[in-house]
Image (cartoon, rainbow, N blue to C red):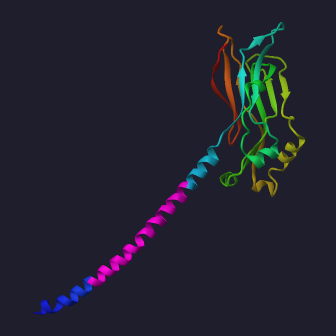
Amino acid sequence: MELIRNIPGKIKSVFFLLLRALKILNYIPAILLLLLLIQGCFLIFVLQGYFAFTNERVVAEVIMYPMETDENENNFIVIEFIPFDNPSAIDTAINGEAEQRPAAEAAETYTLYGDTVAIRGPLLTLHHGWRFLGFENVYKLALIEGEYRYPGAEGEGTEVYINGGIEESWWDRNNQEADFPYNTIIKRITLSGDEEFGFADDGSGRRKRYEIVVTNDTITWNFIGYVED
């Protein structure tokens, strides 16, 4: 009898529990949406960091001919330099994006004495926080240089200034990079750029083709294949 008398109360308790469950279910779409938003924000955060810290920009192409020797036994290298994007420093800082690549007819031919070729220029590197916010490092291709690097090699290399050369203002900034407020923005200012060794002709007449790439830390070469006649 006692059990029968408690049945209405139990039914009433179950009814209220069902109502509470239904109310909780009403919040599930909102909870799922919130979780999706959190996941989306996290994904954007990760992708922004990835692109900011691994960004590379192809700014020129170089076609290098086999190394030759003149009548005085001095080595020299002929290159074709095709600039893709040679803006001023202020253009790089404001626009950020490379211009459309020019046609091959824009190639500039240089004869460089030396057994290596270097392409250098000032590079202003920002702190990672500014890179993460979308600001770009500031760079400029300014110098094409032939150098003698092989052991025992002697001679005077060739320097060719391009894109207006290196302005004195760059060295002024270099002297101030550790001062406030510059040190809150600028990580370092350097004259950056790698060099690439020349190569002997194997009889095929093949030339080497490179991209000049600006990374977050330097200006470097990227070999992309051979050019054959």
Q: Residue at 88% of width from left, 40% of height from top? A: 167
Please report the bounds of the magenta region as a residue range: 15-43
Q: Residue at 86% of width from left, 37% of height from top? A: 166
Seen in the picture, residue 213 relative to 4 is either above or below; the reply is above
The x and y percentages for residue 94 are: 77, 49
Instruction: Give the quarter of the image for residue 103.
Output: top right
The x and y percentages for residue 163 are: 84, 34
Instruction: Give the quarter of the image for residue 204.
Output: top right
Q: Residue furthest left?
A: 1
State which quarter of the image contains the C terminus.
Answer: top right
The x and y percentages for residue 16 are: 30, 84
In the displayed structure, does residue 186 sit left or right of residue 52? right
Residue 38 colored in magenta in the image: yes
Residue 51 colored in magenta in the image: no
In the displayed structure, does residue 60 sit left or right of residue 158? left
The x and y percentages for residue 45 are: 57, 55
Closer-to-camera residue (73/165): 165
In the displayed structure, does residue 74 sit left or right of residue 26? right
